[in-house]
Amino acid sequence: MSLDNVKHIVLVLSGKGGVGKSSITTQLALSLSLAGHSAGILDIDLTGPSIPRLLGLEDGKITQAPGGWLPIEVHPSQILPPIPSPASAESTSDAQNGDFNCTTVGEPTNGATASPIEAEKVDENEKRIGSLHAISLALLLPSRSSAVVWRGPKKTAMVRQFLTDVLWPPLDYLLIDTPPGTSDEHISLAETLLKNSQTHPNQLSGAVIITTPQAVAISDVKKAINFCKKTNIEVLGVVENMSGYVCECCGERSNLFGKGGGKVMAQEFRVPFLGGVPVDSRWGPLVEEGLRPVYGDVANNGENGEDVEGDGERVSRGEKDREMREDGLLVDKYRNCALRGVLEGITRQLVEIVKAQGNGAVR
C-alpha cells in the first residue's frame, strides 16, 4: 500500500461546511513543515477541492508513475532565508497576544513578548524545514471549474484509489482534508484506514475536528465526533476557527461569530481543545495573491483606497500590493502571518498527543 512510507495519519473533519477545514489543514501542514516535520496533504473533498488553490498548485498536474501517482512537491526540505522585517511587523505581536491561546516563540524582551518574526531571527538560518507534498482530485480535472457529478460508488472507489495508488515519499504526517458531513467518502476512508491499521497499528493517529463558535455549526460538528466514536477513530482535539477578529486599526476584538462554542463542545465530549484561530484579513491575500503579510497600515489609509505615506504622498492600494507581492515559497511568506504563532501552538499540542499515543499513554 502506498501509505507504507507514512508514519502518522491525521484526518481533518467537520460535520459542517464552510468552517475552514481546508484553511486549517493548510496551516497545520505549513506549521508541521516549519517545525521540521515532513508533511503531506491528501484532499478527498471530491466535489469542492480547495487545497490546490490554497497551496498555489492550480496549474499543477499529477504525474503517473509505475505503480501509481506521484504527489506534487509544494516545497522540498531546506533552510529558509532570514525572515523579512517590515517596519509595520510590530503589530503582528499585538494580534497574537489577544485571547486566542496563542503561543509565541522566544523569550520576552524588556517585559514584552517577542513576536515569532523577532524571536526566530536567532536560529532561522540554522533550522531546516520539512518537505511538503500534496495531491487532490482537482489536479486530475481539465479545469478548476469542472464539476464532479458522481454517485456514491464512484466516490468510494476514488477515495480508495487515493489511499492505495499515491506514491508518497517518507512522511512524518499525512493530513487528510475531508468533505463536510459523514457520507460515503468518510465511510470508505475509515474502512480502508482501519483495515490498514491491522498491519500498521499506530499509523492512524486520529482526527482533528474543526468548528466555528456558532451554535448552528456546533450542532453539526458534534456528528463528526460521534462518527469517530462509532468507527473507533480517536479524536485528537477540537479547533475553533473564526474565533474572533482583532481590528488592525484600533486593536479592539470583535467576536463576529460568538465565542467559546468549540471549547464547550470539547469539554462535553471530553476531548482536548487545541485552541481558537482568529480571522486574519491578511491570510486571504497571502494564499490568493501571494502577498507577504504586512500589518499596521490600515490606520494610514486615505480616501479612495489610497495609503498616506509619512511625507503625505498618496500611494494607491494597487501599488502597495505590488510592493508586497514577491516570488517565493508560501511557507516562507507564512512566517510573517499573525496566525503562524496560533497554529504553532496548536501543532505543538497535536504532535505531543500523537507522540503520547506511541508511548502507550492513556488520556
Image: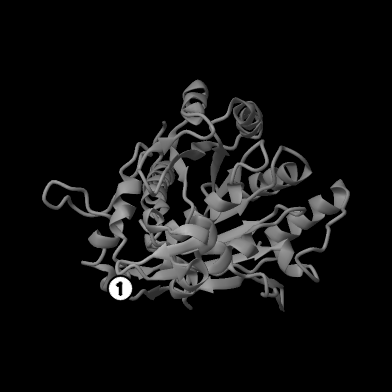
Q: How many marks?
A: 1
In the rendered view, tell whether residue 170 sits above or below residue 339: below
Report the side of 7 relative to 12 (left or right): left
Report the side of 358 relative to 188 (left or right): left
Residue under the image location 29 percent in, 51 percent down: 93
**Residue at mark 1:** 82
Q: Which residue ends up furthest to the left in the rendered image?
A: 110
Instruction: Give the quarter of the image for residue 209.
Output: top right
* Relative image position of residue 86 (x, y in whole percent): 32, 67
Residue under the image location 63 percent in, 26 percent down: 219
In the rendered view, tell whether residue 111 sits above or below residue 227: below
Quadrant placement of the N terminus: bottom right
Q: Secondary structure at mark 1?
A: loop
Report the side of 93 relative to 60 (left or right): left
Residue neighbourhood size for the residue with mark 1, other residues' Cα within 10 Å, grouped as few (<14), some (14–19), many (≥20) = some
The amino acid on which the numbered mark 1 sits, given as a three-letter code, is Pro
* Relative image position of residue 231 (x, y in whole percent): 66, 34
